[in-house]
Image (tube, helix red, strand yellow):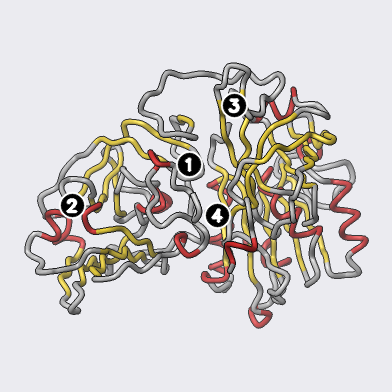
Amino acid sequence: MARAAVPGRLTWQPAIVAATRAETATARTLVLDVDGWTGHVPGQHVDVRLTAPDGYMAHRSYSISSAPGPGRLEVTVQAVTDGEVSPYLVDVAEPGDQLEIRGPLGGWFVRRLADRRPALLIGGGSGVAPLMSMVRAATNPTRLLYSTRSPSDALFSADLATAEAAGGGRVAVTKVYTRVAPPGWPAPPRRLDADALAQVAWPREADAVAFVCGPTGFVETMADLLVDIGHDPTNIRTERFGPTGG
Amino acid sequence: MAVITRGFGGRRRDDADLPPGQYRTDDFPVLSAGPTPRIDLDEWEFAVVTETGERSTWSWAEFTALPADEPTVDIHCVTRWSKFGTSWRGVSVDTLLADVDTAAEYVVAHSYGGYTTNIPLEGLLDGQAWVAYEFDGEPLAPVHGGPARLLVPHLYFWKSAKWLRALELRLDDEPGFWETAGYHNDGDPWREQRYLED
């Protein structure tokens, strides 16, 4: 039975912050140790619950950015201005602190190992987090197109380079800077457009699957462009981060 | 035994209208599974299909000429945001089913683009649900489900199918898109029915 295979998936479990890594000035990866954690499917998320000393609780959902594995997972959090949970996770939490999680959750925006199709991953801003998990776990041809404002806003810079180098040609990463490009970058800052997309998109006959994640406007634009260049709409999976998140 | 998170204070807001595990937002975030379908109003059609296969259909002009309500409701997304006091214009499901002969107990909402969601019929009647085509006095934007979407504010918002094409009346319950992807069959935010096993 499928349900028996995932005991406690929806039970709140203690998670201990094992380490933190600054990704940018306003984003951080938290390494969480969870007893009995059996891993996840790349693209899935967890619910996070924080409890104040007086019992007040706040909940949010965060994508898992690490490769699947037992006992440990990583979430990458972008601090939202005036947010309630994200500023705590980015600025306050320290190794040894406890919170609670449940998951892994989500059965649609996922790239399963059994899915042999090539994938085009398109991430905008912190929407690259679930795609990072897919990149780390890639066993099939995977192209990532990552749109970010500037080098100082870019998440996972070193990890993406490592994954590309270790991928043996399976993984290809293309970055587009929309406001500020690094010195010597071959292209000026620009928005992702149909030309840029067509350069990295798989040919139609490849039967590729596309995963698009980012702010709503970004996802709308990218999904529309994919349809415009002939990508089958039923092979486009989207996940949107609204203007809020907290 | 509760796990206390050191250093977390939280921001309490006195929101008795907020279901458990939700937070309040004043924006209108978007959740959908794929691209926004392109729908031409000249080709738009809405249908009610009964368990015997009988179809009632409306063109855009016919649909927007039906008696409409202007509900103001709170909406609750399973991704944990709630938005209070949203204003809509649409046709109540009571009106759409007034002349329909059915023994159905369940409904599957079908969307342009292929999305589906299932709801017990009684959850759509008695002023609980509308097919809405305006938000905040403006035509409903495609990203929010326009031309027309189902509006069932008492359930998590994935039940309020965007880009609505048809309501299929059924004798049996047929789980829809998210309901077969690990989400709860009923989706009552006040009982916090988010996922399959909740």
Answer yes or no: is residue A149 visible. Answer: yes
Q: Which mark is residue A221?
A: 4
Residue sticking out furthest to the left: B99
Looking at marks 2 and 1 on the same chain, the residue that comes earlier in the sequence is marked by 1
Callout 1 touching callout 4 (CB < 8 Å)? no
Determine which quarter of the picture holds residue B192: top left
Q: Which one is nearer the viewer's eye here, A217 or B198? A: B198
Q: Which mark is residue A83?
A: 3
Query: Is residue A189 rendered to the left or right of residue A51?
Result: right
Q: Which mark is residue B29?
A: 1
Q: Nearer the viewer, mark 1 or mark 4?
A: 1
Element carrying mark 3? loop
Query: What distance separates the C-alpha of mark 4 from that of mark 3?
Result: 26 Å
Neighbor class of circle 4 (other Cα within 10 Å; few <14, some 14-19, many 20+) is: some
- Provide the residue designation for mark 2: B125
Identify which residue is drawn at 7% across, 64% down.
B99
